[in-house]
């Protein structure tokens, strides 16, 4: 337990959409459900000339529907919510912020500094917080900093940022957040694998034919994202972080114990064992990149842009468990459905008694972890239809989290912010984990330049060439 039971959650960049849509509702819901240790104050920090009343009204108008507590409880929560105008690149403003935080607390308080700011302000903000003593833990109460993605733009910049930040605060104070890791199905992967004897013995190259991970989005450049996205692309925006996090949890070895260090050590080992595309003969055979029709006409996008809005690749993990098993990774914009899933496809029996070789692309035994939007687990198999003859039909065992547990699933940010306050870093990225992810992503970006940019229609499943990443008898991409 912390030395004091008062925690101040200080959000830098509090006038932004992330604060009102995700962060404040997450803190509110956690407090309503009595999941936070002790008392909590929320302090919004931004450069806009707002006051407490304006900020509270902004949150009330902008936050999604809140059902965890009554309206009176929301009012009580708002009374503990304050706004402090601060120019985040102005050092003198941080002295005033430090004074105001002390006044609001009235006693020693733990502090979470959530950097909901542009990436170029990450280091500046931490430097200024450090300069005025706001990150000093020597007096007793703890100080923690939460950093959003993107954490760097490549391996070199991530290393520079890591070194600079860790020169100011300890690794135990730095929480690099990936909201995908707060999703219930993602957290359940380890329980599902390591608690169920019927699955763990099959979780290897002897029984798994391939693994698919898809993050499909129906949106494009809405909300003026074109300017940012054109400097990032699908690899930097999704594949090199969210998708790799899912891959590392699915493929990791069992940790020796359920500790933060043991879990993160095993995830890093997976990333270290990912085969580089430039080490493969003819890497272009394993990569398909695309750009949806009309992307170059989007606001903020260069007319001659070569930024990918779709990427699919066939990846390999070179270790004893997964040697030879392909991991097919895919993400894209303007696809027909919005979903994230992991599909573990099991090998077929060695001899086909039913059907013919021409049906070899049908792979019925697939375990699918649905990450979003409908979190759950599906197990596919085949059965005989009643009646004369042998007519085989696909069947499925399905478990839906919300239906099974009869309660709403907490938002990912709620779980992650609870972990920040309780000091659990298991679901956050460590320095070496970030750098290993970038090592692989940088190499993919380099190899990708040897492949043609293929166009695809909006509301399609991307370039048709992505289907060629499967072998003749390896199945097909999932469709939701």
Image: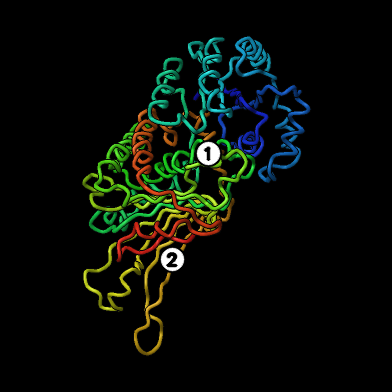
| Residue 406 left/right relative to 84 | left
User: Which is nearer the N-term, disc 2 or disc 1?
Assistant: 1
Residue 49, image x, y percentages: 74, 22
Q: Is residue 29 visible?
A: no
Circle 1 sits in a helix, a strand or a loop, which is it?
Answer: helix
The local crowd at label 2, few if under 14, some if 14 to 19, many if 20 or more residues have their Cα within 10 Å, is: few
Up the image or down, 325 lies above or below 475; here it is above
Residue at coordinates 50% horizontally, 45% vertically from top-left?
183
The local crowd at label 1, few if under 14, some if 14 to 19, many if 20 or more residues have their Cα within 10 Å, is: many
Q: Hey, which residue is sitting farthest front in the picture?
A: 304
Question: In the rendered image, which quarter is residue 113 located in?
Answer: top right
Question: In the rendered image, which quarter is residue 352 located in?
Answer: bottom left
Residue 68, image x, y percentages: 66, 44
Q: Nearer the viewer, mark 2 or mark 1?
A: 1
Tally the marks: 2
Cα separation, mark 2 vs mark 1, equals 41 Å
Circle 2 sits in a helix, a strand or a loop, which is it?
Answer: strand
Kindly identify which numbered label has been placed on residue 276.
none
Residue at coordinates 45% horizontally, 31% vertically from top-left?
153
Residue 382, image x, y percentages: 37, 73
Residue at coordinates 34% horizontally, 67% vertically from top-left?
363
Up the image or down, 123 lies above or below 441; here it is above
Up the image or down, 6 lies above or below 131; here it is below
- Identify the residue position indicated by label 2 in the image: 397
- Identify the residue position indicated by label 1 in the image: 230
In this view, the residue in front, 156 or 434, is 156
Residue at coordinates 41% horizontally, 21% vertically from top-left?
160
| Residue 241 left/right relative to 284 | right
Q: Hey, which residue is sitting farthest bottom in the picture?
A: 388
């Amino acid at each position: 337990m912390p030395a004091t039971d008062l925690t101040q959650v200080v959000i830098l960049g509090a006038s932004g959409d992330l604060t009102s849509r995700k962060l404040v509702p997450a803190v509110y819901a956690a407090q309503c459900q009595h999941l936070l240790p002790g008392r909590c104050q929320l302090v919004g920090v931004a450069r806009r000339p707002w006051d407490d009343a304006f900020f509270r009204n902004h949150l009330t108008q902008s936050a999604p529907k809140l059902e965890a507590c009554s309206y009176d409880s929301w009012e009580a929560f708002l009374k503990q919510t304050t706004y402090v105008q601060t120019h985040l690149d102005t050092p003198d403003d941080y002295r005033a912020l430090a004074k105001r935080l002390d006044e609001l607390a009235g006693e020693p308080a733990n502090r979470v500094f959530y950097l909901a700011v542009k990436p170029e302000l990450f280091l500046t903000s931490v430097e200024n917080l450090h300069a005025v003593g706001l990150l000093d833990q020597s007096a007793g109460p703890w100080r923690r900093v939460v950093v959003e993605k993107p954490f760097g733009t490549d391996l070199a910049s991530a290393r520079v940022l890591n070194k600079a930040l860790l020169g100011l605060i300890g690794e135990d104070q730095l929480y690099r957040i990936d909201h995908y890791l707060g999703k219930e199905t993602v957290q359940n992967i380890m329980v599902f694998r390591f608690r169920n004897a019927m699955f763990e013995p099959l979780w290897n190259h002897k029984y798994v034919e391939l693994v698919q991970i898809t993050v499909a989005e129906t949106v494009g450049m809405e909300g003026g994202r074109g300017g940012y996205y054109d400097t990032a692309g699908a690899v930097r925006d999704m594949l090199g972080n969210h998708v790799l996090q899912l891959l590392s949890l699915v493929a990791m070895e069992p940790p020796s114990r359920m500790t933060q260090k043991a879990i993160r050590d095993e995830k890093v080992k997976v990333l270290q064992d990912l085969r580089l595309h430039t080490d493969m003969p003819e890497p272009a055979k394993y990569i398909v990149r695309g750009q949806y029709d009309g992307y170059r006409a989007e606001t903020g996008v260069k007319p001659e842009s070569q930024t990918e809005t779709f990427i699919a690749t066939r990846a390999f993990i070179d270790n004893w468990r997964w040697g030879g098993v392909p991991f097919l990774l895919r993400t894209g914009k303007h696809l027909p459905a919005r979903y994230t899933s992991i599909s573990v496809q099991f090998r077929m029996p060695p001899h086909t008694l039913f059907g013919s070789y021409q049906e070899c692309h049908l792979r019925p035994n697939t375990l699918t972890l649905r990450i979003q939007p409908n979190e759950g687990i599906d197990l596919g198999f085949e059965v005989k239809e009643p009646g004369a003859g042998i007519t085989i039909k696909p069947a499925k065992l399905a478990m839906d989290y919300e239906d099974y547990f009869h309660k709403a699933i907490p938002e990912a940010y709620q779980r992650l912010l609870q972990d920040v306050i309780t000091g659990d870093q298991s679901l956050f990225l460590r320095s070496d984990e970030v750098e290993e992810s970038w090592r692989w992503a940088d190499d993919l970006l380099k190899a990708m330049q040897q492949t043609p940019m293929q166009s695809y229609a909006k509301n399609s499943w991307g370039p048709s060439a992505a289907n060629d990443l499967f072998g003749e008898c390896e199945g097909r991409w999932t469709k939701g």
